[in-house]
Amino acid sequence: MPITYQIVGCTNPNGAEGVDYATNRAVKTGDYDFKSLAEDIQFATTVTKADVVAVLTAAKEFIKTHLLQGQRIVLQEIGALQANLNSKCFAQSVIPLEAFDPASYIKGCGIRFRADADLLRYVRTNRQLKRVPSELLA
């Protein structure tokens, strides 16, 4: 199955005026959800769907718990997940103050995913591409 992409407009990387730029962007073709994953695992193994769902649900809960404890979740041959913070920069001179509240400088929290090198290499070497219609090519 090919990776679908679309040509979309983008800003000039050098800041020059008067030239329109375009780039290729991957296009989502659908979702592969929890239910679909459980069904595929059931059909590929001798495990019942109920057992697969129970294991995936437990794995999800353990992953959430350990991310909140600051641990990196390493899923062999898939990749690694780690919680990260988005924070404002602040002058180092304010750090020693007793009234300093580091949490007030945190703008948000997210999860960083880093794909396993072998998985990334597989996708890069086995990819097929398919262009979908774009406004720029009308």
Image (spheres, rainbow, N blue to C red):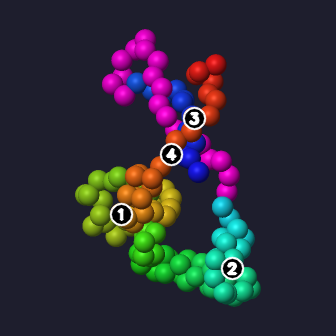
For the residue carrying disc 1, how many other residues have a C-alpha within 10 Å: few (<14), some (14-19), or many (20+)? Answer: few
Q: Choose the circle earlier in sequence order: 3 or 2.
A: 2
Q: Choose the circle earlier in sequence order: 2 or 4.
A: 2
* Residue at the extreme top of the image, as rendered: 18
**Residue 53 position in % (x across, y down):** 69, 81
Q: Quadrant of residue 135?
A: top right
Q: Quadrant of residue 49?
A: bottom right
**Residue 73 position in % (x across, y down):** 44, 76
Q: Amino acid at mark 1?
A: Ala
Say which mark, if any, is on residue 117: 1
Callout in the foreground (3, 4) = 4
Callout in the foreground (1, 3) = 3
Q: Is residue 83 above or below residue 47?
A: above
SS assignment at label 3: strand
Based on the picture, tell me whether residue 23 belongs to the magenta stretch. Answer: yes
Q: Is residue 59 visible?
A: yes
For label 4, the residue is 128
Q: Choose the circle earlier in sequence order: 4 or 1.
A: 1
Callouts 3 and 2 close, C-beta under 8 Å: no
The span picked out in magenta is 13-31
Callouts 3 and 4 close, C-beta under 8 Å: no
Mark 2 vs mark 4, CA separation in Å: 28 Å
For label 3, the residue is 131
Mark 1 vs mark 2, CA separation in Å: 27 Å
Magenta portion: prevailing SS class = loop
Mark 3 vs mark 2, CA separation in Å: 33 Å
Q: Amino acid at mark 2?
A: Gln
Q: Amino acid at mark 4?
A: Gln
Q: Is residue 54 visible?
A: no
Q: Choose the circle earlier in sequence order: 1 or 3.
A: 1
